[in-house]
Amino acid sequence: MPGTYIPSEYLPVLIFIIIATAFGLGALVIGTVFRPKKPYPDKLMPYESGVTPIGEPRYRFSIRFYVIAMLFVVFDVEAVFIYPWAVVFDKIGIYAFIEMVIFIGILLIGYIYAWKKEAFQWD
Amino acid sequence: MIPELFFAYFAFAIVLFSIIVITRKNPVHSVLWMLLLFFHIAGLYLFLNAEFMAVMQVIVYAGGILVLFLFVVMLVSLKEEIKVARFIGAWPTGFTFAVALFIVILMSLRSFVAGPQGKYTIDLIKSESNIKVLGKLLYTDFLFPFEIASLILLVAMVGAIVLAKKRFKG
């Protein structure tokens, strides 16, 4: 019957997440409860290796970061598609090989375009 | 009973985190709450017997797309952005649209009829492993949508470069 599926093999993952969350939150809570609290302006200043901070911590990033992140996501998704393909490759054979060549070929056009447009240049 | 309990938790958490994401004053906080939201969506996938989708939700969304969001947030001037009123526009308009959408969803849910059970039952998928079944279907029956996906990725890649191209020159 649909809807009654329990992914019981993921129970260790659930336990891991619960322990990790409890550990992280617990450390923060225990720290807040027990540590002495005597703040003064110099202590609350952002730590920059002992030097007095200059300027704002928030400045606008270069748009290159966005392009790099976008290219990363695209190739990330491409890698995701290759994964199930590799698992069933021996069952489908040459047919699967051709379709993956087309898939990567289309994305290769984008890669060459990015290269030609100097999207990987950083100066 | 256990699936219902987990679904109730995930559904509640997803709605709660979505509201938190859109009401945060600081965009960086919004993105970090979204990370929690993505993990809960992965949990929901797990209970839908979509193991591979759940793992990819964590790798691609929580790993890749969230970084992209963070960079986009860093691109805009945060100091000015925080000062701008977040919920612009008259609330009656927004409320009307929300109610209309809710009614549409409710109507479509009421007329929902479960289709006939297909070849791939939970037992079959379990005996053959999720990823093998997915791979077999994706690279044979759903070959065309798979190739279309590469075109969509290509459009995303070219689009990002075209958007940012002017900045490269100057």
Image: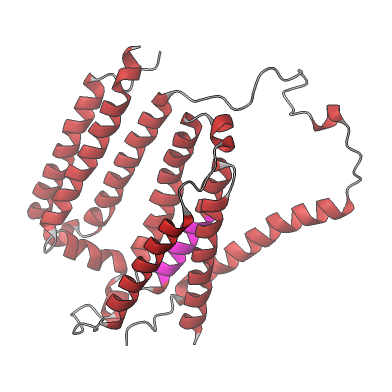
Q: Quadrant of residue A23?
A: bottom right
Q: Residue at x 32, y 83 (%)?
A: A2
Report x, y in % for residue B82: 58, 37
Q: Compared to B158, does B18 lie above or below?
A: below
Q: Position of residue B94 (x, y in %)?
A: 42, 57
Q: Left or right of A48: which side holds A86?
A: left
- Highlighted range, magenta: B36-46
Q: Give the left or right position of residue B116, taking residue A118 as reference.
A: left
Image height check: is B113 above or below A76?
Answer: below
Question: For residue A67, what is the image quadrant?
Answer: top left
Say whether residue A39 is left or right of residue B93: right
Instruction: Assess whether residue B121 is covered by the magenta stretch.
Output: no
**Split into 4 quadrants, where in the image is the C terminus of chain B?**
top left
Residue B144: x percent and y percent?
11, 55
Q: Is residue B21 left or right of residue A70?
A: right
Q: How is the image coloured?
A: secondary structure
Expressed as whole percent of the image width and height from the top left, the position of residue B127 reads 30, 77
Looking at the image, is B33 positioned above or below residue B156?
A: below
The number of discs equals 0
* Residue A117 in sight here: yes
Up the image or down, A15 lies above or below A48; here it is below
Residue B127 visible: no
Q: Nearer the viewer, residue B52 or B16?
A: B16
- Residue at image location 40% in from the left, 56% down from the top: B57
Residue at 52% in and 81% down:
B5
- Secondary structure mainly formed by the magenta segment: helix
